[in-house]
Amino acid sequence: MKKTLLAALLMSMTGSMSAHAATVYWVDWTSKSYGAPGLATGIMDVAGTGVDVSYSGELFNAYDQGNWAQNPESYTLPGVVDNFPTPINESIQLVGGLVGGNPIHNVLTFSRAVVNPVIAVQSLGGAGVASYVFDQPFTLLASGGGHWGYGPLTASGNVLTGNEGNGIIQFTGTYSSLSWSVPNPEFYHMFTVGAPAISPVPEPTTLLLLCTGVAGIAGLRRRQNALA
């Protein structure tokens, strides 16, 4: 009985994460400090809850920040990501390459853990090929034409590669940060980030019931061990 109650509580908590699975709440970048490294901050309004987003890494000062509304099908997958990034002319621009013999480590940090975050990429690669090498696995959801070109994105393991590639990738699970490097330079490419949900914080009553259920299961196991 207690195991059933605990399972029901866990299901009700995780169910709220996927309630808006098809709507992605994109970051609004509000400040930037250019450089290598550079800094940027923004906010995501995730279903009415504000999540502060900070970025540290390379930040190139490009006049044209792209246009996410151009070829919007490149940045959507119906039923998973229904809406392309907004604001449509906001992004973080990168060139990539090495500093002191090492690639710059780019890091996105969220003030509250987000569920299944999505990164939109625009114009990755140009005359040559450029790659984003992530520290965690992801899924390539869509790719196609964009503001500058029509090259595809391809994925292999933790590496996203493009030749004027545009599209979206998604990280499955709950994340407080995402990180990657761009070891081979290309002038220039850009990204933004969003999420369909945040990790839920249990209401006090729910948390009490959950703790009681766990304690009850632990007590039952101790009694069973004592009788064995």
Image (cartoon, rainbow, N blue to C red):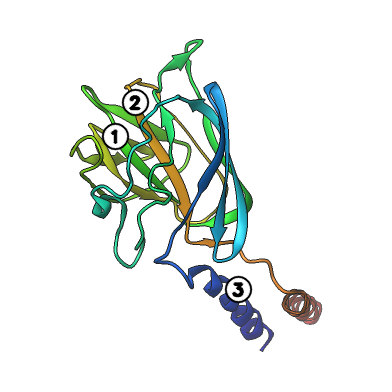
Between tags 3 and 1, which lies in front?
A: 1
- Label placed on residue 13: 3
In the image, is residue 199 above or below residue 36?
Answer: below
Q: Which residue is mark 1?
A: 123
Give the residue type at disc 3.
Met
User: Of the residues under marks 2 and 1, which one precedes in the sequence?
Assistant: 1
Task: Tell me the quarter of the picture where residue 89 sits.
Answer: top left
Quadrant into which the C terminus falls: bottom right
Circles 2 and 1, Cβ within 8 Å, touching? The answer is yes
Q: In the structure shown, which secondary structural element does the residue marked by tag 1 occupy? A: strand
Residue pointed to by mark 2 = 188
Q: Camera-side residue: 36 or 207?
A: 36
Q: Position of residue 64 (x, y in %)?
A: 36, 31
> Vertical placement of 208 versus 160: above or below?
below
Q: Seen from this angle, which residue lies furthest bottom?
A: 1
The residue shown at (72%, 74%) is 203
Inter-mark Cα distance, 2 to 1: 7 Å
